Image (cartoon, grey):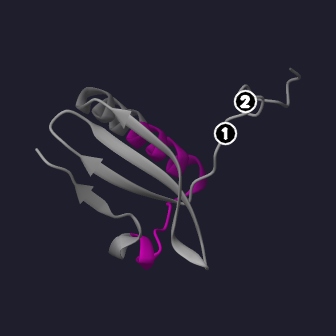
């Protein structure tokens, strides 16, 4: 591996997602990562990641801290209205 190639670029199972759904139950969080386009705005499921509430909270904390650092360095991330108004849907599972 050369200096310009990250360990993630060498993996064969990388996916790109521009949409996701979230299902929540008492026991776990399910992140359904999808790839959407103009002909398929709801997207096709590419990967579903399940994690415990504890791991989901750790992800939340780590992601939040890194987003703050990113915005300090590059500027505020402006969220398009379609994302704020439902592009990132949350589905509540059974408790």
**Can you say whether 69 is above or below 41 in the image?**
above
Q: Which residue is at the front of the view, 47 or 9?
A: 47
User: Outermost residue, top direction?
Assistant: 1
**Can you say whether 32 is above or below 26 in the image?**
below
List the residue tagged with mark 1: 14
Count residues near mark 2 (Cα–Cα under 10 Å), then give few for <14, some for 14-19, many for 20+.
few
Based on the picture, tell me whether residue 52 belongs to the magenta stretch: no
Q: Residue 78: which disc?
A: none
Q: Residue at x 20, y 51 (%)?
A: 93
Based on the picture, tell me whether residue 70 belongs to the magenta stretch: yes
Q: Which residue is at the front of the view, 65 or 16?
A: 16
| Numbered range of the magenta stretch | 63-83
Q: Quadrant of the C terminus?
A: top left
**Can you say whether 48 is above or below 1 in the image?**
below
List the residue tagged with mark 2: 11
Count residues near mark 1 (Cα–Cα under 10 Å), then give few for <14, some for 14-19, many for 20+.
few
**Residue contact between numbered discs 2 and 1, judged by CB atoms under 8 Å:** yes
User: Residue 38, percent across and down?
Assistant: 61, 79
Instruction: Quote the CA–CA distance across marks 2 and 1.
Output: 6 Å
The number of numbered badges drawn on the structure is 2
Q: Overall secondary structure of the magenta stretch?
A: helix
User: Residue 6, percent across and down?
Assistant: 76, 29
Q: Which element type, helix, strand or loop, lies under badge 1?
A: loop
User: Outermost residue, right direction?
Assistant: 2
């Amino acid at each position: 591996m050369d200096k310009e190639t990250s360990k993630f670029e060498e993996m064969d199972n990388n996916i790109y997602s521009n949409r996701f759904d979230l299902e929540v139950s008492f026991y776990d969080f399910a992140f359904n990562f999808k790839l959407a386009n103009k002909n398929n705005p709801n997207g096709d499921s590419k990967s579903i990641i399940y994690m415990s509430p504890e791991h989901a909270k750790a992800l939340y904390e780590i992601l939040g801290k890194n987003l703050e650092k990113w915005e300090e360095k590059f500027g505020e991330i402006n969220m398009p209205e379609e994302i704020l108004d439902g592009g990132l849907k949350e589905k509540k599972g059974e408790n």
